[in-house]
Amino acid sequence: MMKVSLKYYTIKYLITILLLIIAVWAALFYAYILDEVYDNVDDGLKNRKIQIIKAVYLDEHLLKNNEFGFNEFKINPISAAEHQEKNKLFNKMYYMEYDDEEQPYRVLETDFIDQFGKYQKLTIRTSTVEEDELVYDLTTALIVLYLLLVVSIIGINGFLLHKAMKPFYRILDKLKKYQFGISSDKESPKYSIKEFEELDREINEMIDRNELAFNQQKQFIENASHELQTPLAIAINKIDLAIQNDQFDEKDMNFFTDIKNDLGRMASLNKSLLMLSKIENNQFSTLSHVNFTAMIKELVNSYEDFIEYKEIKVNLLDKEIFETIFSPDLANILLSNLLKNAVRYNHQNGILNIITEKDRMIFQNTGSMNPLDGKKIFNRFFKQSTDSSSTGLGLSIIKTIIKQYPGWDIVYDFEDGMHSFILSKNKS
Amino acid sequence: MKILLVEDEAELRNTVQSFLEAQHFIVESASDYSSGLDKIISYEYDCILLDIMLPDGSGMDLLKEIKSMHKKDPVIILSAKDSVDDKVSGLEIGADDYLAKPFHLAELMARIKSVIRRKNQDGENIITYKNIFVDPDNRKVKIGNEELILNRKEYDLLYYFVIHPEKTLQKTMLAEAIWGDYIDQADSLDFIYSQIKNLRKKLKALGAEADFQAVYGIGYKFV
């Protein structure tokens, strides 16, 4: 179904309904006017009948007027049996020499007794050609009226809707701009329309309710993660202690190391969830000037052993300095996640290019020969590889950080066997 | 050696951190109660420096948490309050030392060394294992009478083994102690092996009586 705006929707209906109403009204009006006109004509005919009969009594020659002449009447003798008291009025077409066509006439037929006591039939006619013009004029007038009405209704409708619906569009705009977790302008303007005031109030209340539920949920995740951390750490510590004290033989030792690794994975998953929730809760709000180019150099240094072991060649290419106002903690998490990712999913003897430009930072690395699914990799718990040690949250943390900064973006690209993550700022 | 610094004042945190890093410590820092707690729960430190006034809680509560988890990490309280009451309550809860702000970095250093000495070295200045002598204050190692020259990581690694002799040390613990907390995010800790290999070569060359024993899949033991 085609979607139309409120304005056109109402206009569409108004115009059709109006057309119907005007048509019915026009028909009734026409019938009424016509009735009036015939009444008038008939009165005229009746009046002439009396005058003609009077004239006949004065001048018997008129009785010989058997055809319609310029007087537009004729008198024909009839038998006594045919005689009727009543006037007969009807419409009839007569041939007219003037324009060689049949033309409509109104006709009055009546019988009377002349001065000689004979029965006579008097027929009087009058042309009704002008009534056609009347109908024509009437129709034109009605069409003009209809068009005028439509135009003015469109105008009034537009104006009224614009005026009356202004708060509606303002509310709509507010909803469009609304983002979860980001409190918008809650201050309600004065509404002169009760319904809109109600709508606005209800929407604000709904938003508050949702935010509350959302916050409670976030709080729950955060608390749950926090609470989980301690028992996890205790369990890991106990295993550590037992391993350190050589309480097991080699078989048991391996068994417990496996358990420890699983617990460790759980702990790091938990930590990542906590991190996500902290980022979303804006707990990294201290901003300062961060030089990303310098920071990535430091990070590459601290991951040196890790990178060297995989024999990855790291090329730091700083075309320009990438620096901005950012949370230093988040910048560290962001860059180290990108770096770790590029090393971790690289192969032995791989290549890692880190290119910094004024508004972009590109991590380009070798790795799997197939491109990743760029649409899904930033989703939580998305794992392309069968790598069991991955939490599936690293890239989603990156995305969550980026979302905190308007104008920033991170995209994935695959070209010539190189996986690229392109971090950009100041995107318009 | 790894130190955790919980301090909300950025200026002081940075000063202390760079000072300690210059002294070859690995320094992890936290600026508030919750991130401090996160670190304490997840990792082990040779020394924790704790500020009492934190934006979202008290360092005293953190200290209580440490003790309730039966962690043996030594704690030094850093406080702006120099009252006897505070000192007493801090030490009673289980802090190992108390330092009032402002303090001298040299004094902080001495106290850190002292608590580490007590914890890791049974209070001895020189740690001895077989014919290996480690002097943590000067970061020097002697095999018999000969000095062994090590780089920073090799020294840290050897120190960690010497204070835990004949114990199975897991790769994760070694990595965290020598490289820092972030390393637990690395997918493979096999890179430790190359460090051990280098260290073993140097120890052998000078005739050390102890060697690393690989415990398959878990880590190493120094015997």
Image (cartoon, coloured by chain):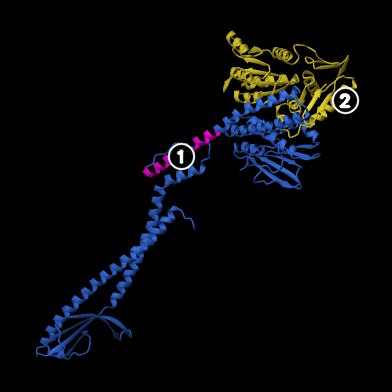
Position above or below: A373 against A400: below
Q: Residue at x 76, y 42 (%)?
A: A367
Please state if B26 lies on the left or on the right of A36 as rendered: right
Q: Residue at x 40, y 58 (%)?
A: A13
Please state if B74 lies on the left or on the right of B200 as rendered: left
Q: Quadrant of residue B135?
A: top right
Position above or below: B139 against A342: above
Residue B20 at what x, y percent from top left? 72, 19
Q: Main secondary structure of the magenta part?
A: helix
Position above or below: B163 against A263: above
**Helix, strand or loop under label 1:** helix
* Residue A35 visible here: yes
User: In this view of the protein, which residue sits in the foreground, A148 or B60?
Assistant: B60
Chain in blue, by letter, is A
Which residue was labeled with disc 1?
A206
Which residue was labeled with disc 2?
B201
How far apart are the alpha carbons under marks 2 and 1? 70 Å
Please state if A16 lies on the left or on the right of A303 as rendered: left
Q: Residues within 10 Å of mark 1 (few under 14, many from 20)?
A: few
* Residue A318 visible here: no
Residue B75 at what x, y percent from top left? 66, 16
Identify the hue of chain B: yellow
Q: Residue at x 67, y 46 (%)?
A: A374
User: In this view of the protein, which residue sits in the foreground, B62 or B216?
Assistant: B216
